[in-house]
Image (cartoon, rainbow, N blue to C red):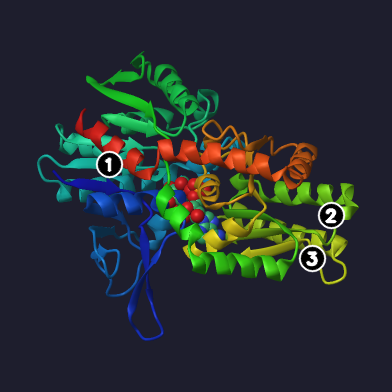
Amino acid sequence: MGLIVVSNREPYAPRRGGDGGLHWVPSIGGLTAALDPALQHAGGTWIAWGEELPGVADVDLPQGNPRYRLKRVRLTDAEVRDFYHGFSNRALWPMSHYFIERTRYQASQWRTYVDVNRRFAQAAVESYREGDLIWVHDYQLALVPRLIREALPDARIGFFWHIPWPSSEVFRTLPWDHELLDGLLGADLIGMHTPEYVAHFLSACRRVLGAEVEGNTVRWQGRSSRVVDRPIGIEVDTYEELAASPEVEEAADRIRRTLQTQILLGVDRLDYTKGIPERLEAFDTFLGRHPEARGRVTLLQIAVPSREQVESYRQLRARVEGLVGRINGKHTEGGWSPIQYIYRGVPREELVAHYRAADVMLVTPLRDGLNLVAKEFTACSADGVLILSRFAGAADELPEAVQVNPYNPEGLAGALTRALSMPLEEKKARLARLRERLRQSDLRTWADGFVAEIAGT
Ligand code: ADP
Ligand code: F6P
């Protein structure tokens, strides 16, 4: 029995080095961060869209220590534009995150979405051997379970939806609401991060399809699908060990020595759902209220470029850069600047060193499916404070974080004050409880458990 994972994003992207050699660089994002270690453990096949690079085909990964086979689905530029930048990221992404005013529902892009989903399904069917388990991921591939089911009526198919599932009132704005649900219900098992997302999904099945829903089971087209909340965990031990390593400790010391202040940290893909401008403005408010904090606190924002072909992401970048400039211009004095802004992805050791160096981690999305950064920081920090948006899926699991409403800059500024002055004992006690929770459901538990549930359907 083999495992076939299907996702849009490939776990590593090929790059030609200066020496002409081929390097596979890890992709950045929650889905690949979770699934790469999971598939390395389980072995199997990963089907994903392969970024175009001449002479590069299917490959065994990770490079140097291969554990699974990556099968690369080729898409034309026009398909990438309409399927990925278009329907996935201008329709489904904003709709699912409650940004209806940013959605563009275009029939031509929907048609490409259907065609591309068909190609992914076909690749899965071609790889399938009797007894295999198929695990499809995320909103880019919602039709794939049904399309596979048509070709393989008896296959065991699981699906994981990594982003929020919105209220059915919002979901019903999608002109293809019926088709999307029908596509997903080709799976035997559908996973989401929180009980609320599951409840919204079940409600959509009732209202949009008129499907029969009993408990967590949806009956549709003569088949049943079970819908469950299974929030992703992280590799707690791996992060803890890395954080305690001498190299990381030294790098964290270097960061502290360079800044010479208390450190607030933000780590995100540059996405409008992550609440970065709101965070910067709250910090500005905080500095206005606390002149004594000048020269004593720095906000370090690490933002990795994301989806730059989509207009709203380009606008966000300009807005963030403008805000960083404005706030630094307003407050900079005597060699101290309040915001340090890094616009790139950083290697994992460096990221962990930043988690370790931070006094306060700011995870303040306006809406987020789960948010792994919050969990990674919790596993790495020795005595930091996590400030966490109530609109991150991880909020339910992490009640000892300082929880905030990111839409309220005053409240966020107040949370900063509280976090920066929290007694050491309280910080440690909160972290210890949070860490305990992470351990109860880590990445291995999540992945093995979900695969076992698919197998049991
Ligand atoms: P999303 O899936 O929306 O990107 P998550 O917080 O769930 O959000 O996952 C983001 C993943 O990407 C995490 O594993 C995090 O460590 C990584 N990441 C985010 N920003 C950066 C960055 N600037 N450099 C390196 N890794 C990053
Ligand atoms: O975790 C949600 C998600 O959209 C994943 O599907 C995706 O891999 C990740 O964020 C990063 O986005 P993208 O693949 O568009 O770079």
Question: Sequence order check: which comes first, mark 2 or mark 1?
Answer: 1
Answer with the quarter of the image where residue 395 lies: top right
Q: Residue furthest front?
A: 425
At label 3, the amino acid type is Ser
Residue 175 visible, this orientation: yes
Graded by Cα atoms within 10 Å as few (under 14), some (14 to 19) or many (20 or more), the crowding at tag 1 reads many
Q: Is residue 132 above or below residue 74?
A: above
Graded by Cα atoms within 10 Å as few (under 14), some (14 to 19) or many (20 or more), the crowding at tag 3 reads some
Secondary structure beneath dot 2 equals helix
Percent position (x, y) of residue 271?
58, 51
Q: Is residue 401 above or below residue 124?
A: above
Residue under numbered circle 1: 135
In the picture, the disc for residue 293 is: 2
Q: Residue at 55% x, 50% y: name it.
A: 377
Asked whether disc 2 touches disc 1, contact meaning CB atoms under 8 Å apart, the reply is: no
Question: Sequence order check: which comes first, mark 3 or mark 2?
Answer: 2
Disc number lying in front (3 or 2): 2
How far is disc 3 from disc 2 in space, using C-alphas?
Answer: 12 Å
In the picture, the disc for residue 337 is: 3
